[in-house]
Amino acid sequence: MRSYLVVSNQTLGGAALAAKVRALLEEGPGEFHIVVPATPPHHGAWTEGEARAIATERLDAALRWFGSIGATATGEVADEHPLYAIRDALRDRPIDEIIISTLPPGMSKWLRQDLPRKTRREFGVPVTHVVGEAPSRTKSA
């Protein structure tokens, strides 16, 4: 059984990532570990607690969705810096592939940080980059 690390925040509940997960499951059974970096919200003042609460809501919804399609999934809210979050998640877990879901170019802080390339270089496992849609404007977006 293949093991996947999914790294996402704002695009976690989006159609692009869902399509990728479904395609992977069509290829064969897989286990997914979801890492949601607790990145700061994009509105005015914020607290670390607020960032973690938003990430926790997204993770909980994702775990329910993964379960609803029959996928085995675990997850965690992690460090706000996605590369650190990936490093922590891989410490005790063998992974066959890392799936990074970001906002589109121009909107994505992770792409400005060159996260997919840095992840490939540092961890030496296949990395798939999924470009998700921007979330609708809500209090947590």
Image (spheres, rainbow, N blue to C red):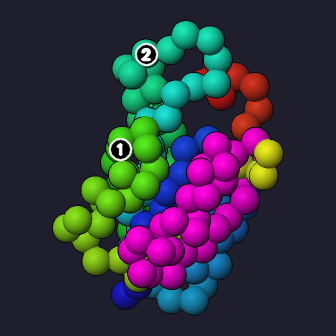
The residue carrying mark 1 is 78
Where are the magenta residues, as a range? 107-134
The answer to whether residue 119 shows anywhere in this view is: yes
In the orientation shown, which residue stands out farthest toward the top?
45
44 to 11, vertically: above or below: above
Magenta segment includes 127: yes
Residue depicted at 36% across the width and 51% down the height: 84
Q: Are marks 2 and 1 in contact (CB under 8 Å)?
A: no
Count of marks, rendered view? 2
Tell me the tag on residue 46.
none
Tell me the tag on residue 47.
2
Secondary structure state at the residue bearing disc 2: loop
Q: Which amino acid does label 1 sit on?
A: Ala
Residue depicted at 72% across the width and 54% down the height: 132
Quarter in which the N terminus is drawn? bottom left
Residue depicted at 38% across the width and 59% down the height: 86
